[in-house]
Amino acid sequence: MKYLKFSSYKALLSLIFIFYTLSATAAETEKQQELVFLSWSEYMDPALLQAFTKQHNIAVKEVFFESDQVRTEMLLRTQGRGYDVVLVVGADMATYRKRGWLAAIDDVQVPNLKHVNPRWQEAFEQAPKGYGVPYLWGGLGILYNKDKFTTPVNSWQQLFKPEPRLKGRILILRNNKDVLGLALKSLGYSYNSSNRSELKAVKKLLLAQKPFVGSYSVAILNKTSGFVTGDYWMGMSYNGDALMLKDLNPQLKFVIPQEGTALWCDYLTIMQTSENKAAAFKFIDFMNQPKNAAQLAQYVRYASPNQAAEKLLPPEYLSNPLIYPSKAVLERSETGIALPPRINKTRTSIYNQLLH
């Protein structure tokens, strides 16, 4: 009798041990993965991240940069390690590929790639194909308080050669390429100019403008923004940011100047050093599901490169020229290209003189 009880006791202990071992294994199997996403702030719908996590049991940790230059510096420090998915502007794609930072992406790993407009796959002639998936596209313009101006604002000249009363009332984006590129356009030159005399002229222009600039920074997209509080009367702005700020201050107006603008497209890329490539592919594919791409576009107020998503967008959204510029505006505009190192060094030197 004692022997049977002891045997039963041992059997029970064995069953308990097996149960907890299996439970621990299952818990380990179901442990939530984490994906690190390097991006701009306020450039993602939180509801989409929640839906992705719920569907795939993968949490997304967002890390933010405040300019293209800062993003490059962050990646240089680790050679891409520590990040899985990185948002990269088209003009930087070629450089990042040459550095060996980007992993290849194709429609086997990302089936929803089939929905992307080929135009944006080929928009940047120096960008290597198959290493990034278009995320959103847009342009830059001038955001201003219409109560402060008696004449229409329609030229980059009005921003870069401001009236005396605008001293300290201007916001300029903290972005080397766009600041110099659009100042060059205001002088009638190319956004991508490598001409030394033209760069000398734009340096003179920007240094003369410097006392009028209240801040070289990214626009804040809430009620504390200087465009909402009245601290800034005019400034550079991305079109989607401008539309969000207009909701907070109806006196704001956004215009794409007559000289044209800089067109950009941001790409979702995967770091070659990522240890979570399978999760990264799932994330990019999820973001390119048409309904998700349409939801993202409306949340951040930018144009979608996803053709199937555009079919889900309201007609008034697609016909808004501040989101989808007219053909005439597009023809006057340029996309950034990778410039020679010596020219980048010159441009960076000019830009740094504005910040210090």
Image (cartoon, rainbow, N blue to C red):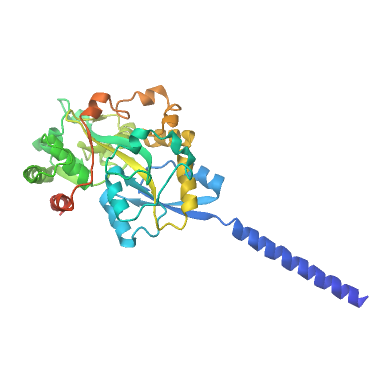
**In the rendering, at what x and y percent does residue 43 appear?**
37, 42
- Taking 296 as reference, is 66 above or below it? below
271 lies left or right of 56: left
- Taking 340 as reference, is 112 above or below it? above
Residue 169 in view, yes or no: no
Which residue is located at x 45 percent, y 44 percent?
A: 284
- Residue 159 sits in which quadrant? top left
Check the image and name the residue furthest to the bottom: 2
Residue 160 in view, yes or no: yes
- Taking 255 as reference, is 55 above or below it? below
**In the rendering, at what x and y percent does residue 48 appear?**
48, 41
94 lies left or right of 298: left
- Front in this rendered view, residue 154 or 263: 263
- Taking 323 as reference, is 111 above or below it? below
Which residue is located at x 14 percent, y 39 percent?
A: 183
In which quadrant will I find the C terminus? bottom left
145 lies left or right of 136: left
Which residue is located at x 27 percent, y 25 percent?
A: 326
Which residue is located at x 81 percent, y 73 percent?
A: 10
**In the rendering, at what x and y percent does residue 251 appear?**
26, 29
